[in-house]
Image (tube, grey):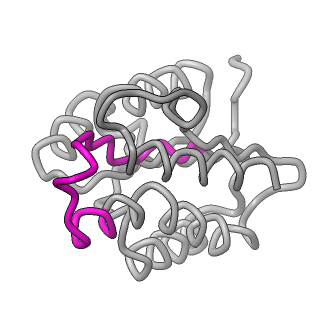
């Protein structure tokens, strides 16, 4: 029996990298896991790797209607959420002078606006107690070359986590 037996967990950006590894660790500890992603290839690969141990849900972390639909799907299928790992993110690095408004908006939607409104939509489903984990970046605290937009979004996410 694992530490997360019968715990309901959501991992955004859970179809590759840190998110997929977290899903595997949560499953090994007995959790019921839902993972999200938007890339068809990584969604299929996550389904292959995780099998029937996880619910793989196509979701765009930067689209508010997609985030609300995710919350509705979870509410319809699960009685609660015990842990949420908001890991989906855009880590685009580019010099300040080349950023265009559309790319800036997309990055902010994925890294800040999406998580904010997903948390809001999940509030009725969150168990008491529950954990909400926001994946930040060292760039929120220290200056890194070409990280202006990403650093700004992650600093805002860090501030959100404090409130």
Q: x, y (%) of residue 149?
A: 38, 51
In the rendered image, the vertical position of residue 125 relative to residue 12, given as above or below:
below
Q: x, y (%) of residue 94?
A: 22, 42
Q: Residue at x 69, y 18 (%)?
A: 2
Seen as rendered, the residue at the extreme front is 97
Q: Residue at x 33, y 31 (%)?
A: 50
Bounds of the magenta segment:
85-106
Q: Nearer the viewer, residue 77 or 63?
A: 63
Q: x, y (%) of residue 66?
A: 38, 75
In the rendered image, the vertical position of residue 85 relative to residue 17, given as above or below:
below
Left or right, 112 with reference to 91: right
Which quadrant is home to the C terminus?
Answer: bottom right
Left or right, 12 with reference to 161: left
Which quadrant is home to the N terminus?
Answer: top right
Inspect the magenta stretch and tell me whether residue 86 lies in it. yes
Q: Nearer the viewer, residue 74 or 138?
A: 138
Q: Residue at x 20, y 33 (%)?
A: 48
């Amino acid at each position: 029996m694992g530490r997360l037996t019968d715990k309901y967990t959501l991992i955004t950006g859970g179809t590759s990298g840190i998110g997929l590894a977290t899903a595997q660790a949560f499953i090994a500890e007995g959790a019921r896991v839902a993972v999200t992603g938007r890339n068809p290839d990584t969604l299929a690969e996550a389904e292959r790797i995780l099998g029937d141990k996880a619910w793989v849900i196509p979701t765009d972390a930067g689209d508010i209607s997609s985030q609300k639909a995710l919350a509705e799907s979870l509410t319809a299928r699960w009685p609660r959420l015990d842990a949420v790992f908001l890991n989906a993110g855009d880590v685009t690095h580019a010099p300040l002078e080349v950023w265009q408004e559309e790319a800036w908006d997309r990055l902010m939607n994925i890294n800040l606006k999406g998580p904010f409104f997903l948390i809001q939509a999940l509030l009725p489903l969150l168990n008491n107690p529950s954990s909400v984990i926001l994946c930040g970046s060292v760039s929120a605290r220290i200056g890194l070359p070409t990280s202006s937009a990403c650093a700004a979004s992650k600093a805002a996410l860090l501030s959100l986590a404090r409130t």
